[in-house]
Amino acid sequence: MTSRPGHRRLRQQGPGRRASNARQARSQAVEFSSVTVERATPVVRVDPERPAAPAVERAAAILRDGGIVGLPTETVYGLAGDAWAEAAVRRIFEAKQRPA
């Protein structure tokens, strides 16, 4: 995988690697992003092996109401929303701080 111009890629995380990555980042003057949360965001953890029906139903209700939910992937978290709901699409763009 190649880095974007002006960006440096840190080594993969693993046991005992965090301090090493922090030193590497400081030595390379890597800029970190920050995220500002303007309201309380509920967090519902779902066991992928045995998902609890109430948690799945809550996520479905959030999506039906035009909300967005975060979903873990193999590398990062993705944001999900109803693509047909204008408010949900707008919320995803706002959360990612991207122009609509």
Image (cartoon, rainbow, N blue to C red):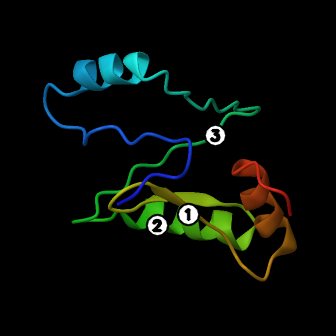
Proximity of marks 1 and 2: CB atoms separated by less than 8 Å: yes
Of the 4 image quadrants, the one containing the C terminus is bottom right
Q: Nearer the viewer, mark 2 or mark 3?
A: 3
Q: Amino acid at mark 1?
A: Ala
Label 3: which secondary element: loop
Tell me the number on the disc at residue 41.
3
**Residue on which the image places disc 1:** 59
Tell me the number on the disc at residue 84.
none
State the image coordinates of residue 46 (x, y, percent, origin top left).
36, 56
In front: 26, or 97? 26
Characterize the local packing of mark 2: few (<14), some (14-19) or many (20 or more) Cα atoms within 10 angstroms.
some
State the image coordinates of residue 82 (x, y, percent, origin top left).
70, 76
Label 2: which secondary element: helix
The number of callouts visible is: 3
In front: 48, or 16? 16
Label 1: which secondary element: helix
Proximity of marks 2 and 3: CB atoms separated by less than 8 Å: no
Residue at 32%, 23% (x, y): give it.
Answer: 24
Question: Of the residues under marks 2 and 3, which one precedes in the sequence?
Answer: 3
Which residue is farthest left?
A: 15
Which residue is farthest bottom?
A: 84
State the image coordinates of residue 86 (x, y, percent, origin top left).
86, 73
